[in-house]
Structure formats: structure tokens, C-alpha cells
Image (tube, rainbow, N blue to C red):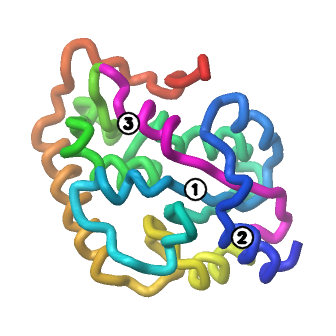
Amino acid sequence: MEVNKLIEFFRDSKNARPSTIKQLKMENYETGLYAWYSDLSLVQKAGIEIPQGPWLINDSILLYVGMISERKSCMTSRLRFHACRGRADQSAVCMRLGCLLAGTLEISLHQVPGRAKQFFWHQRNTLPNWALGHLYFKACQCYRAKEFEPEIVSTLIPLLNRDYKPLNDFDKVLDRLEDFHTDLARRNPRPPEKLKWKLGHLGDAH
């Protein structure tokens, strides 16, 4: 698929699928592109106002466009990692969504003592459960994913991407919000006693 067709493919949120384990496991390949979308409930629940912009598509928000290249992982693992089931410090989707929803969902960012691992946590797995109800994805195999990603991001300007797009006022506010949560997590690294850090298995039943 050529880059212009990929741009149109990801510009349209139709046929985006829910982030269940069953759906994620269908994307079993090593090179490709993917996009994450949220329904408009994010606008109502975010701790700060989400402005109008090209990321608003019909009744959804284009959150993030990314790619996976050969030998690093597989698409299923990458998508599952971004579906708020993994480390926030290694996922822009998880980190930035967690920052936006922290106040509404009453979640907080925690850092494993002595390590760099950071997770948004609540006893009821609030963020992963929110993701299951409100996040959707599209993905496709593409052997030129690394080459095409910059143009797709710079054209579509997804809400949560950091690279390949002009920095806007919302990005600056979100960066400050992320700095606040990560600094707080570093200064208060001791997590609740019942916290289990192996969050990669959350949502397996779905």
C-alpha cells in the first residue's frame, strides 16, 4: 500500500476494532503501521481541555500513529503494550492517556523502587478497563513502515504523537502534565503493598 492510501486508511476511523486480546492477536506480523483512536468520552473525562484539531475525526479522536519494524517485536505485542496494559514509561499512549485521565479515574503514576519502571495503577485496574471500553485500533502490514511513518504522522497530526509533527500549545501543556506525574512518581517510589507489577497479563480474559 502506498503512503497516500495509508494516510486515507488511518484518517478514517471506520472499521477500527476494540483493544481486546482476541482482536490484538489477529495482527501476527513483524513489520507494519498502526493507529489508536478514542471515542469522544476522552473529551469529557480528560483533566484538561482537548482542543479542536485535525485529530478529531467524525465521532472519534486519532490518538497515535506508530510503526513496528522487523526483529524488534511483533504487531500483537506492540499493540497490547500500548493498550494501557504495560509500562507507562515505555508507551506514549499509556503515559499520556494516564496523565489526561489521572484526576477523573483517580489513578496515580508509580515507579518501582530502584528501577525506572513506571505504571499507572489503581486497585480496580481502572486505566486498562477504560482502555478496553474506549480505545480502538487499526493496523496493517507494511514493509516500508519506517519510511512512511514520518509523512503519515506529519499529515494526520495525531493527538499524542511527539515526533514528526509541529509542536502545538496542547503538546506543551501535556508535556508539563507528564513532567508533573513522572517527577511525583520518582520522588515517591514506594507503591501500595498490594501492587503487582506484572501488568502485562491484564485483560487476558477479554
The spot of residue 61 in percent (x, y) is 50, 63
User: Does label 3 or label 2 sit earlier along the sequence?
Assistant: 3
Quarter of the view holding residue 3? bottom right
User: In the image, which is nearer the foreground, mark 3 or mark 2?
Assistant: 3
Quarter of the view holding residue 103? top left
For the N terminus, which image quadrant? Answer: bottom right
User: Does label 2 or label 1 sit earlier along the sequence?
Assistant: 1
The spot of residue 182 in percent (x, y) is 22, 50
* Nearest the eye: 64 or 188: 64
Q: CA distance from mark 1 to mark 3?
A: 15 Å
Q: Which mark is residue 127?
A: 3
**Magenta-colored span:** 124-145
Report if the CB atoms under discs 2 and 1 are less than 8 Å apart: no
Q: Which residue is mark 1?
A: 36
Q: Which mark is residue 146?
A: 2
Label 1 neighbour load within 10 Å: few <14, some 14-19, many 20+: many
Q: Residue at point 59% right, 76% down?
A: 153
* Nearest the eye: 197 or 96: 96
Image-based side of 23 in relation to 159, left or right: right
